[in-house]
Amino acid sequence: MVIILLYFLAVAILIYFQKKEIGQGIFKTSKKTNWIVSGISLFMLQVSIEQGQIYTGILEEKGLWGLWLFFPGMISAAIVPLVFAPIWSKLDFITDNQLILFRFSGKGARFLHQFRSIYVGGLVVSFLLGFHVLAFSRILVIYYGFNPQKAIYITGIILIIFALKNSLQLKLKLDVFHSIIYFVSLSLIFYYLYSAAGGWENTLTKFNNENSDRSNLFPPIGLTQEWNLLFVFLGIQWWSAQLFDGGGPEMSRFTATKGKWNVIKASITPIILQLFLSILVIMLSVMTISMQHTSGSEAGFIKGIFKAVPEWIAPFCVVGFFAIFITTAESLMNWGASFLVVDLYKTYLQKNKTESHYTKISFGSMAILSAVALIIALNVSNLQDLIKVIFSISAGVAPIYILRWFWLRINAWSQLSAMLTSGICTLIFHLYVSFYPDSFLLSPLNAYSWQLIFVTITTTIVWITVMFLTAPDDSFKLSKFRSILPPKKQLLKSFSLALLIGICLLCLNLLLLKWVFYSN
């Protein structure tokens, strides 16, 4: 308990000495920051508290090959640093949503700008926050013995309190502080789990006792549905359901960094760190399973850790988990509130208020997002199912986010129709499965594969049709947008190089896993 109190005291001291920055740079820094600070902040944004929990659930249920749900995402990893991060830095927006008014014209642009402010800033961000609230609440359940509902309430209240000081300018510094706590706690966890499991060779022996195929990088031969699912992950999901044009909370880190090469270095930092971190988290998950500390659930990851570490170290581990949780949650809150305040409230509802007024509304918006996230977390129980829903809602939308930078015929109505169609199709598919749960038992594809294919194809057909049925953007707007882009050949060359590097990263990840699991 002393360690936890010392953490909050340290945060309070940091806030006190930087209190002038709380009311400044809420959504955008007033001065440029070092690329290392931005890079670490990007890394801490991408590290998630639920990663180990989801990995453990998948490894226990399917084995190593089940993590192909995430592996193909590496293919697009280098696209942001090499292609889009320098462009975002040049645009220097407060929110990535402002690109809509810069890129598109007419009523469609204004309507899409307003719609996305509410849909993403309010609904999507609340769901993402709820995801993280649920993940951290499990730690309180396991370590303190709280019932799940009470743990969610406590987590939500803490999040609301932190929302009241959530300024981007201050947060970038706190992210570095939290990264130190995270790395130290992760090192301690790995050391004690490794010792408790009796070394890695012993860990693998126990891990494979029940099923010798658990360590396979690919599904067992003969499992048709599983192989087809892998091809869906590799062939469709990474480009259809993952938005990788550099928008989102990452954008504010690009604009906070000065100079093209500094932006590239900052955005490459989390890729390198994440590659090795994911291997480490997989090893931790395998250790908790091999020690038979899991209970067939995602929460088994947390249980295994707290059973392995000494009692005096456990509070520091709680602080380490909290550091990951609050860093990501604050970034999401800040991102969502920027949409609601800058893009909606300040642009359309109240244009001429004082900065003090907008500051209060900003912190209030973050507190409201936290409260809504609390409510969502109370009604969700499975992280793996929720992340698949998030992938599905994005299915078919991701391509238009990339193509709008290259294909200038795409207009605001195209993007709007894609966003609406993917959400509606996901809902329709879930309703179908709830009425006909056995529909895919004899199918060569499982329900999730069909859902991803159905949503992707339908969304693509709809947005392309809408694009050709509606008027193109005006030439002045397109000319202005084209002026900030590199030459088309250079853009395509950078994009192709980034894809090649991404494929190499995926292969490197597989080679590292093969070495870790088969070197003995």
Image (cartoon, helix red, strand yellow):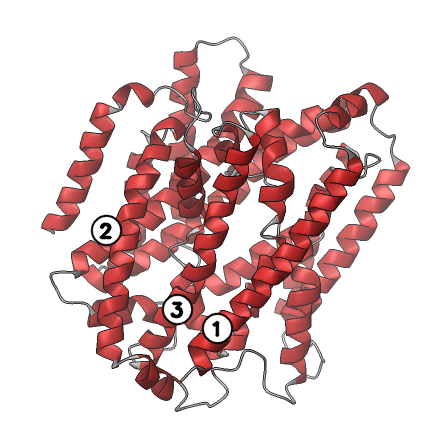
Badge 3 local density, few (<14 within 10 Å), some, or many (20+)? Answer: many
Q: What kind of element bears circle 1?
A: helix
Residue 513 tag number: 1
Q: Provide the residue designation for mark 2.
A: 319
Residue drawn at 34 percent across, 29 percent down: 170
Q: Provide the residue designation for mark 3.
A: 298
Camera sees residue 398: yes
Is label 2 in contact with label 1 (beta carbons under 8 Å)?
Answer: no
Label located before the other in sequence (3 or 1): 3
Label located before the other in sequence (2 or 3): 3
The quadrant holding residue 447 is: bottom right
The amino acid beneath tag 1 is Leu
Label located before the other in sequence (2 or 1): 2
Q: Is residue 474 above or below residue 411?
A: above
Label 3 – label 1 distance at C-alpha: 21 Å
Given this view, does label 3 or label 1 mark the residue nearer the observer?
A: 1
Given this view, does label 2 or label 3 mark the residue nearer the observer?
A: 2
Camera sees residue 406: no
